[in-house]
């Protein structure tokens, strides 16, 4: 009796645990579903949510129900085919025990068992929603008659949009039928229909019919797979290039056709065999199929490749290589022909003077170096952080100037005292302002020449809306940092806006934007608390029904959640548009199924964490996120792209026509770095359109290796493209372009370069310029070697590295000026580890025509290079400055240092003290007769 009671209690305990687990699973699913729905409503993309949801439901239901029906029907057939008479055998006793245990529950157990497996099958099928939506929405979308593949004469849309779903259906049917057949065979064994140890007939005639039908259907599905498999030849990797090769067309394609017929014949043999004893016919058929797949599908193509193609590969593969060249140039958007450009032997002073706009916009500051300097000088408070620095252009004094800018975001890791829940989620809710500086000027100490700085933001040429309480343009609730999953605004706890630097204390604010989801009542708060595993969201008395929770605040999560089918550039960038801070992120439509186009790994081409294999790419979308209210706009930049056309049909409310983008925003769109890096990687090979030359790699170009940032360092990766404001040889005015040089494969001299325009009206235009054979133009590695070998530069590097300082090379920039080239190498100095590290621009090296000159600024270096001024002296400083001038400068730095000290900005304080001491040292040099010293870069 006691034993029975314990058994009952144990049974109820197991049931209770199961109920708790089930409730937990349902709550997780419900909270995730409901929070996602609320978020999509917040960003006005609820149509996207429901389209994806119902696509998943449809796929899961159709494939799940189909599997359930097939499995249930076949297991029921097994039950009906159970033989009444079962001769005794050693295995019969086991079978009888099984039947005695299962038979009473079989009517319910079979559907239950099938339902459980079908549930998992349905979930797996739901994951194919992107493939399904492409197939469903592709009607009427085509690349055009000019792009039909030369083998099957189909539009690429078939291979990209329709074929993947057809292959999924075929693969699913094949796997499902094989799995069901295995389960049916096991079930027949345990019901006595298959008797392995019985003498004589081991399979009953009824079971033979059942299995023969199943195996015949499997072979028909396999035949369909062979038929679809022939289309994969158009992205075959067998030949010297991607695409159907000679062997694929003349051996593999016929082999697949033969396998289709043989598979159908085998299926018929299985059905015919129902009327004959034994399994001899289907076994012969299967043997023929296997033999054909090995001989015709593998041995014969291998023989053709080795004995027909290899001895005369160029002649055999020539038409297929030509197809690959044409397809690749289109698919990567590099169907441009290099223009011959004869370089001048040297740059002249007149050319420099005539191209002052280009010279004054040469970027000296390296983004990661400037980020450290911003962090030291403009962090203001320890809870702010500059994640990275972006390059853009802004109108300054009526001219377009290249500017570097970084947003000041709040970092929860810097909250005083480590930050409790209230601080992290209710008080320190947003960053504030941004910092901008010109790319090639510094102050007397080598610090950046700020165009926008401090809190509240003070702009000399770039303005943010920053007058409380209407300072929404400066408040950053959405950014790149992702250290806190959510914040809650409009609570009873005022938010920290910023600390008044003039001593007025902390200024508070209350969020007035439309971003965020209303917290609502108890039910909604409970779901949020469960979703984020944070009970404070439910019990905090500071949150009421008017409060709003801001989730998915980092740009990466926010935009990817809205458009998960797009690939994105590695780095979104900040821009100031009409006084407000926005984030701009380039998005790509990609596929690896474009016929004959070369396949590559994006990570290989870009040297970045941009993953996935592609053979077609377009920068079809410009994603824009408002830093204050989180509004997402996805502007269609390439309406001619068939991939984005299909996604627009699938999600009609997601995208915004490019024509609706404000001109002030369009002015900040840039050609993406990762895209040009990928295109340049391909163009290095596919600029050649002559097949024999292409085959022999005779004119293959390579991207130059990345240069080390320290003396005698090692190269890493390849040289990244960079933005410059230049006048290309074919243009009448300067453009803001993305620039990438090429070197011959295996050599160091520069042979060509490619530039992509970012200016409105010319955006996206690629232009390539190639130097004539025999012309020797120094490449980046050669120029760096010249710099390292120059005695004057070596002396300066030695002096700069003294007294516990480290020397850092900035980016070596190659700047085309008319038909000549100017090479510019900035040099920074920073404190060694263990000391306050504030990188400062101390020297600039210029190289042209083999001449190397170094000075404290770009203008001085050019003057030295053309014999107009002396080189740098160890002290640095300003020529012609008097002792009183330098002492006045020192006083200014001391006053600025005191302001930083009052703000608690110790790094900024130390930087100003260093600058003041530097000015005093220069004054001391003058008193001792040290003479004048070179000047810092002049302001424009």
Image (spheres, rainbow, N blue to C red):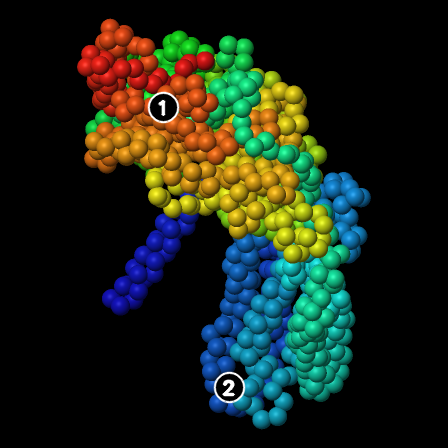
**Residue at the image point whose x is 48% and y is 90% from the top:** 90
Based on the displayed image, in which of its 4 quarters is residue 75 positioned? bottom right
**Residue at the image point whose x is 51% and y is 77% from the top:** 99
Disc 1, SS:
loop
Residue 169 image point, x, y percent: 65, 57
**Residue at the image point whose x is 71% and y is 47% from the top:** 689
| Quarter placement of the C terminus | top left
In this image, 838 relative to 26: left or right? Answer: left
In this image, 378 relative to 161: left or right? Answer: left
In this image, 659 relative to 532: left or right? Answer: right
Residue 485: mark: none
Position of residue 115 relative to residue 811, above or below, is below
Q: Which of marks 1 and 2 is nearer the N terminus?
A: 2
Q: Which of 843 and 505 is in front in this view?
A: 843
Q: Nearer the viewer, residue 827 or 120?
A: 827
Furthest residue in direction bottom, as rendered: 199
Check contact, mark 1 vs mark 2: CB within 8 A.
no
| Quarter placement of the N terminus | bottom left
**Residue at the image point whose x is 74% and y is 42% from the top:** 143
Residue 851 image point, x, y percent: 46, 31
- In the picture of the structure, the residue carrying the numbered disc 1 is 871
Q: Which of 36 and 291 is in front in this view?
A: 291
Q: Which of 736 and 554 is in front in this view?
A: 736
Residue 10 image point, x, y percent: 30, 61
Position of residue 719 relative to residue 884, above or below, is below
Q: Which of marks 1 and 2 is in front?
A: 1
Based on the displayed image, in which of its 4 quarters is residue 344 positioned? top right
Label 2: how many residues lie within 10 Å, few (<14), some (14-19) or many (20+)? Answer: some
Tell me if I can see residue 622 in this picture: no
Residue 546 image point, x, y percent: 40, 20
Residue 92: mark: 2
């Amino acid at each position: 009796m006691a034993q029975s009671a314990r058994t009952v209690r144990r049974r109820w305990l197991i049931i209770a645990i199961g109920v708790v687990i089930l409730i937990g699973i349902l709550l997780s699913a419900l909270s995730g579903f409901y929070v996602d729905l609320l978020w999509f409503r917040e960003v006005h993309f609820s149509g996207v949510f429901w389209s994806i949801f119902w696509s998943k439901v449809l796929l899961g239901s159709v494939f799940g129900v189909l599997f359930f029906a097939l499995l249930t029907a076949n297991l029921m057939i097994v039950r009906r085919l159970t033989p009444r008479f079962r001769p005794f055998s050693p295995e019969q006793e086991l079978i009888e025990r099984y039947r005695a245990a299962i038979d009473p529950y079989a009517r319910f157990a079979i559907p239950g068992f099938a339902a459980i497996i079908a549930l998992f099958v349905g979930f797996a099928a739901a994951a194919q929603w992107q493939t399904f939506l492409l197939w469903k929405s592709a009607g009427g979308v085509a690349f055009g008659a000019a792009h039909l593949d030369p083998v099957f004469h189909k539009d690429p849309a078939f291979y990209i949009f329709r074929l993947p779903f057809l292959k999924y259906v075929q693969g699913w049917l094949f796997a499902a039928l094989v799995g069901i057949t295995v389960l049916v065979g096991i079930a027949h064994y345990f019901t006595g229909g298959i008797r392995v140890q019985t003498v004589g007939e081991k399979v009953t005639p009824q079971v033979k019919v059942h299995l023969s039908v199943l195996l015949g259907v499997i072979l028909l599905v396999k035949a369909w797979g062979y038929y679809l498999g022939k289309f994969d030849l158009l992205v075959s990797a067998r030949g010297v290039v991607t695409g159907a090769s000679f062997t694929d067309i003349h051996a593999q394609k016929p082999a697949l056709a033969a396998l289709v017929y043989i598979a159908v014949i085998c299926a018929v043999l299985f059905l015919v065999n129902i009327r004959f004893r034994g399994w001899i016919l289907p076994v012969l058929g299967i043997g023929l199929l296997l033999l054909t797949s090995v001989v015709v599908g593998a041995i014969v193509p291998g023989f053709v490749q080795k004995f027909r193609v290899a001895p005369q590969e160029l002649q055999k593969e020539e038409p297929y290589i030509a197809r690959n060249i044409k397809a690749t140039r289109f698919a990567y958007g590099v169907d441009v022909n290099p223009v011959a450009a004869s370089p001048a032997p040297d740059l002249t002073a007149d050319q420099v003077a005539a191209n002052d706009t280009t010279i004054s916009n040469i970027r000296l500051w390296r983004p990661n170096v400037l980020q450290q300097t911003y962090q030291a000088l403009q962090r203001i408070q320890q809870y702010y952080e500059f994640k990275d620095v972006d390059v853009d252009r802004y109108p300054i004094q009526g001219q377009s100037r290249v500017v570097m800018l970084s947003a000041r975001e709040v970092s929860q890791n810097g909250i005083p005292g480590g930050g409790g829940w209230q601080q992290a989620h209710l008080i320190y809710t947003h960053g504030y302002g941004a910092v901008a500086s010109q790319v090639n000027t510094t102050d007397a100490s080598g610090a950046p020449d700020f165009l926008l700085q401090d809190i509240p933001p003070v702009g000399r040429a770039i303005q943010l809306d920053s007058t409380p309480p209407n300072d929404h343009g400066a408040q950053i609730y959405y950014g790149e940092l992702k250290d806190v999953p959510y914040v809650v605004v409009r609570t009873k706890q005022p938010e920290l806006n910023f600390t008044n630097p003039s001593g007025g204390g902390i200024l508070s604010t209350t969020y007035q934007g439309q971003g965020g989801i209303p917290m609502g009542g108890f039910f909604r708060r409970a779901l949020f608390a469960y979703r984020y595993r944070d009970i404070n969201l439910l019990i905090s008395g500071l949150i009421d029904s008017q409060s709003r929770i801001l989730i998915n605040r980092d740009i990466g999560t926010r935009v990817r959640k809205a458009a998960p089918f797009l690939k994105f550039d590695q780095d979104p960038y900040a821009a100031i548009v009409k006084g407000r801070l926005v984030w701009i992120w380039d998005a790509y439509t990609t596929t690896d199924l474009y016929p004959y186009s070369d396949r590559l790994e994006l990570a290989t081409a870009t040297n970045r964490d941009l993953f996935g294999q592609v053979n077609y790419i377009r920068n079809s979308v410009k994603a824009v996120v408002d830093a204050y209210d989180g509004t997402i706009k996805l502007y269609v930049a390439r309406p001619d792209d068939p991939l984005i056309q299909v996604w627009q049909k699938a999600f009609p409310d997601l995208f915004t026509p490019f024509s609706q983008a404000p001109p002030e925003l369009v002015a900040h769109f840039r050609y993406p770095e990762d895209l040009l890096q990928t295109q340049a990687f391909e163009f290095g090979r596919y600029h050649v359109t002559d097949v024999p030359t292409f085959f022999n790699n005779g004119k293959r170009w390579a991207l130059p290796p990345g240069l080390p940032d320290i003396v005698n360092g090692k190269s890493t990766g390849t040289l990244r493209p960079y933005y410059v404001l230049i006048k290309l040889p074919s243009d009448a005015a300067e453009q803001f372009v993305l620039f990438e040089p090429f070197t011959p494969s295996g050599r160091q001299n520069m042979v060509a370069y490619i530039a992509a325009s970012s200016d409105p009206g010319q955006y996206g235009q690629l232009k390539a310029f190639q130097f004539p054979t025999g012309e020797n133009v120094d490449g980046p590695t050669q120029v760096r070697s010249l710099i390292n070998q120059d005695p004057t530069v070596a002396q300066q590097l030695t002096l700069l590295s003294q007294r516990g300082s480290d020397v850092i090379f900035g980016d070596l920039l190659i700047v085309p000026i008319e038909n000549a080239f100017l090479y510019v190498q900035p040099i920074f100095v920073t404190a060694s580890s263990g000391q306050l590290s504030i990188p400062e621009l101390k020297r600039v090296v210029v190289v042209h025509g083999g001449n190397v000159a170094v000075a404290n600024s770009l203008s001085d270096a050019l003057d030295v290079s053309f014999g107009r001024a002396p080189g740098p002296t160890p002290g640095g400083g300003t020529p012609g400055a008097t002792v009183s001038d330098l002492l006045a400068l020192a006083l200014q730095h001391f006053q600025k240092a005191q302001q930083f000290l009052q703000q608690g900005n110790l790094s900024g304080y130390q930087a100003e003290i260093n600058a003041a001491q530097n000015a005093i040292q220069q004054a001391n040099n003058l008193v001792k007769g040290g003479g004048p010293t070179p000047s810092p870069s002049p302001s424009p």
